[in-house]
Amino acid sequence: MFTAVAHKSLAGAEGYFVEHLSQNDYYSAGEIRPGQWIGSGAQRLGLKQNVSREQFRALCEDRNPQKDDRLTQRQKKEDKRRVFYEFTCSAPKSGSLLAVTLDDQRLVAAHGEATRIAFRELETFAATRVRKQGNQRDRTTGNLVAAAFTHTSSRALDPQLHTHFTVFNATFDETERRWKALQAGKMYDAIRYGTAVYRNELAKRVKQIGYQITPAKHGFEIEGVSDGVLKRFSKRSQEARRVVQEMEQKLGRKLSNNAVALAVHRSRAKKIKGISTTEVRERQLAQLQPDELQALQKLSASVQPVGLVRGFEPENQALNYAVAYVFERKSVVPEHELLGAALAQHPGEMDLPTLKAAVKRSADLVKTEHGLSTAQILATELDLIQTVNAGCDALAPLHPGYRPAEWLGEDQKRAIYHVLRTGDRITGLHGLAGTGKTTALRELATACAEMKIEPLFCAPTAAATEVLRKEGFEAVTLQSLLLSKPLLSDRRLVVLDEAGAVGIDDMKRLFDLARDARLVLSGDTGQHASVVRDPAATQSRVSQGRRTGCAEAPVGSVRATGAHGCDCGIFQR
């Protein structure tokens, strides 16, 4: 699997090359792990074969190693500039054990081939920043300057076959015909796809060697290696999990993938000095019981190369599964997410070019500005847009003369004024957590009481509903509301909290149920995406369909917008 971290210390960059990258995960006099250049950007610079210390230092200093002149036009101060990104690809533990401890060099070669194929896929997401007339965006360049270093152990001296890809902060912009700083965000986004490609390519080669594989939590393992042995040689993984769990408990939340990678990277023990590769391997062998060692030796010696037999073409079947899986949770997905889900179905049996071709010719998929969707999903979204537009100025204002409490903040007052004075059937109320959105809802309930209008509060989860109840609102879960199907007239106000966590299908059901009522969609702008199909990804497409000129409420920490505005909140996270 792939992990990634960014390095910003120019002062420590050369030392990192000498002490970490060009050495295994222990220090051994005279044993150097040479790096190899990889990436079309490296080819453009004329960098070939092994990585020298001087070349590495030059690129860290943003110099062309062939000409010794500046490579990119720096935009940031030296102490803030990212020197390089480090993408690390690790083999399954069973593969590492057989490749390193049992010295099966066929598996080492298979890992090397698979990592390079996966890395070249990640390279296609390389981008650079484009600034024009005060605006900025990322432009895909598809080329990297990188160095690959393969190591065979963890800091705990367990067998751990892995490759470090040092990606320097430079990419060539064909449009501007010059080298510029790398934008690696899309590479980070595609890291799961890179992992899926690696696992598929590795599994393919493992089976060609003659091993059998079995599904595992993180991809696959090679059959014949017991769980007890795998656990015994996973000391670093166990330590990493402990570090992450302790940090999550301390923070009270789950860490992002990037935060996990950084925490694990920083928790590494120091390298052991004065030990050779032979001694490391002897230590590993000593941890095996005689019967375990005999079984592994027999397994490694007995496998014979086999051709890749494809009794069926799994790509279409895997793609159908992937479509059902990814669009259960999202309305629009990048192509790499769909490909990654498909690759995970049959590791070692998928041909990536064939799978990509299947995506292109699929009649079910529709290409949009933000990725891939399906005709059915887009039709549902269009129905929602039409419902929003049909509710524009459809009702008399709820309570135009209401004056909110003086002690409320200005943003809260403006939001309440907008909801109470609009004639739109559907309005949105958004704000980051802690900005007074709940207080605004309570004031809205007070205004409704003056008009003898009974507000109905609901939320998508039982936990969110309980929060509303503790705040004094009479609330039900969205599912119970949809199942009970009460009659809702224009004298009813339905308030859906955490609207950004509601899937598009349930949103349509709510729209249908509340077609005669008023509907306020409340949510945090920083809220997590929907558990079931997330409408947020299509916000810009939807908002383009509603630009009809009505003024939007002033934006602040809390805001309310109407269906005429550029974002009414239905498709907010």
Image (tube, grey):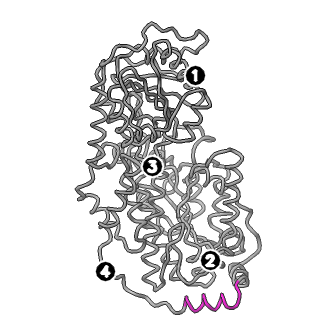
Position in image of residue 389 (x %, y %)? 28, 26
- Circle on res. 413: none
Q: Are marks 3 and 1 in contact (CB under 8 Å)?
A: no
Q: Is residue 291 magenta?
A: yes
**Residue 549 seen from this side:** no
Q: Residue drawn 55% across and 37% down?
A: 464
What residue did someone put label 1 on?
A: 439
Q: Distance between the residues labelled 4 and 3?
A: 36 Å
Q: Could you tell me which residue is drawn at 61 percent across and 73 percent down? A: 152
Disc number for residue 186: 3
Residue 285 horizontal/vertical position (percent): 69, 84
Residue 289 coordinates in the image, percent (x, y) = 71, 87
* Nearer to us: label 4 or label 3: 4
State the CA–CA distance, disc 3 to disc 1. 38 Å
Residue sitting at 51 percent across and 21 percent down? 556
Above or below, 352 against 548 in this view is below
Which mark identifies residue 311?
Answer: 4
What are the residue bounds of the magenta stretch? 288-300
| Residue occupied by mark 2 | 227
Whole-Å distance between the Cαs marked 3 and 2?
A: 36 Å
